[in-house]
Image (cartoon, rainbow, N blue to C red):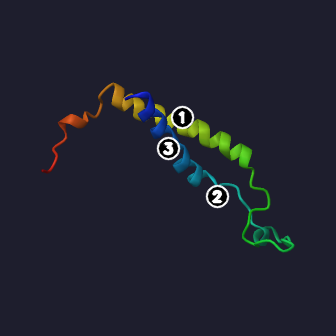
Amino acid sequence: MGVGTAIALYLTIWWTVLFAVLPFGSKSFAEAGVDPEGGDPGAPVNPNLKRKFLTTTWVSALVFLAIYGVAYFRIIDLTQLPWRS
């Protein structure tokens, strides 16, 4: 796996994990019973983005290392899979 492929793979994993992590621990204005004062009542009261970015980064690193390990040690050899023509 080349450097460019590895970076593209990591960024794809990072964005996917970010969208999975964003809803964790979020409480909307409506759920908290707070008046949004002109904002959307479904918006989070405190999104904790710094914590979610850090969580996304380490979870993505673990997923990337697992995928890289599978590719490096050829646990799943893609050249041996049957392809349709």
- Residue in front for this viewpoint, 3 or 55: 3
**Residue located 28% across and 34% down the image:** 76
Q: CA distance from mark 1 to mark 2?
A: 20 Å
Q: Residues within 10 Å of mark 1 (few under 14, many from 20)?
A: some
Give the label on residue 13, or none: 3
Give the label on residue 23, or none: 2
Residue 28, placed above or below residue 78: below
Residue 49 location in percent, x, y?
A: 72, 49
Q: Secondary structure at mark 1?
A: helix
Residue 84 location in percent, x, y?
A: 14, 50
- Residue in front for this viewpoint, 26 or 60: 60
Residue sitting at the far front = 4
Q: Amino acid at mark 3?
A: Ile
Dots 1, 3 in contact, CB < 8 A: no
Q: Secondary structure at mark 3?
A: helix
In the picture provided, is 58 more to the left or to the right than 82?
right
**Residue located 64% across and 54% down the image:** 22
Residue 14 location in percent, x, y?
A: 54, 43
Give the label on residue 61, or none: 1
Q: Amino acid at mark 1?
A: Ala
Residue 2 location in percent, x, y?
A: 39, 28
In the picture provided, is 63 more to the left or to the right than 84?
right
Quarter holding residue 19: bottom right
**Residue located 44% across and 32% down the image:** 4
Q: Amino acid at mark 2?
A: Pro
